[in-house]
Amino acid sequence: MENLQGKIALITGASRGIGKAIAIELAKEGATIIINYSKDDDGAETTLAEIIALGGYGKLYKCNISDYTMCKEMIDHVIESFGKIDILVNNAGISTIGLFMDSSKEDIDNVMGVNILGAMYLSKHVLPHMISKGKGNIINISSIWGDVGASCEVVYSSSKGAINLFTKSLAKEVAPMGIRVNAIAPGVINTEMNSFLSKDEKKELEEEIPMGRFGEVDEIGKLVAFICNDSCKYLTGQIIKVDGGLI
């Protein structure tokens, strides 16, 4: 099935992990994929190669989304090149692990800059175009820690809490213009972000999860593809947890 045939999707942080999985799943549904990334050239090229191998089409765009001007330039470039942006997935995210009192100003600025400001910048720049078309989808990738908080990930949790309220508030503001805004809040997912966990720590976490395992990136990707489908056109302002029953 190609329910997103003809759609243009911009996905941030799509060189690996959840972002890569989202890019691949949307490509399977027929969307043209703009793969945004900030540093990982090889990873971005791999994502693109996998999309092409599936018979899909995509382009790379390297951009630091914590930079307001660069975000505008990327949105303008994509619209100039493809004529539109139907789907914006604000997936890019970073984290630091440690006591909050040991966080540097740079740590705080970097996490907030990517995780919340980047999503705000891109959404702001894409909205006039979406509104002019009378339709559009913005999906923010949050986290269950944005709901309940996580010790030693205070800044990250705070950024995701902000994403949740940004999602709900913006959804109410732009719904009359035909724009849908939702967020997905993953639980513990098998990604590089969790690679620091020891074997014992992973086992302990799995035992806390009712489904007894970590989530997989393709499970998030498939949900994003479903939300982007017109069959979900009444869904907006929601924070959807995907955590195996943990929270």
Image (cartoon, helix red, strand yellow):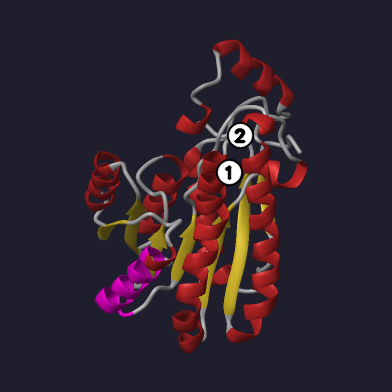
Q: Residue furthest top?
A: 200
* Label 1 SS: helix
Q: Is residue 98 above or below residue 15?
A: above
Question: Is the magenta region chiefly helix, strand or loop?
Answer: helix
Start-end of magenta stretch: 70-83
Q: Which residue lies at the image location 43% right of the left edge and 67% below the top edge?
A: 3
Label 2: few (<14), some or many (≥20) within 10 Å?
some
| 228 left or right of 149 in image | left
Rendered-image quadrant of the N terminus: bottom left
Nearer-the-camera pick, 16 or 156: 156
* Label 2 SS: loop
Provide residue 203's location: percent of width, then percent of height: 63, 16
| 227 left or right of 55 in image | right
Nearer-the-camera pick, 98 or 221: 98
Label 1: few (<14), some or many (≥20) within 10 Å?
some
Provide residue 54's location: percent of width, then percent of height: 27, 50
Q: Are marks 1 and 2 in contact (CB under 8 Å)?
A: yes
Provide residue 188's location: percent of width, then percent of height: 61, 33
- The image quadrant that residue 167 belongs to is bottom right
Q: Which residue lies at the image location 37% right of the left edge and 50% below the top edge?
A: 24
Q: Earlier in the sequence, mark 1 or mark 2?
A: 2
Which residue lies under the disc numbered 2?
A: 103
Name the amino acid, label 2. Ser
Which residue lies under the disc numbered 1?
A: 108
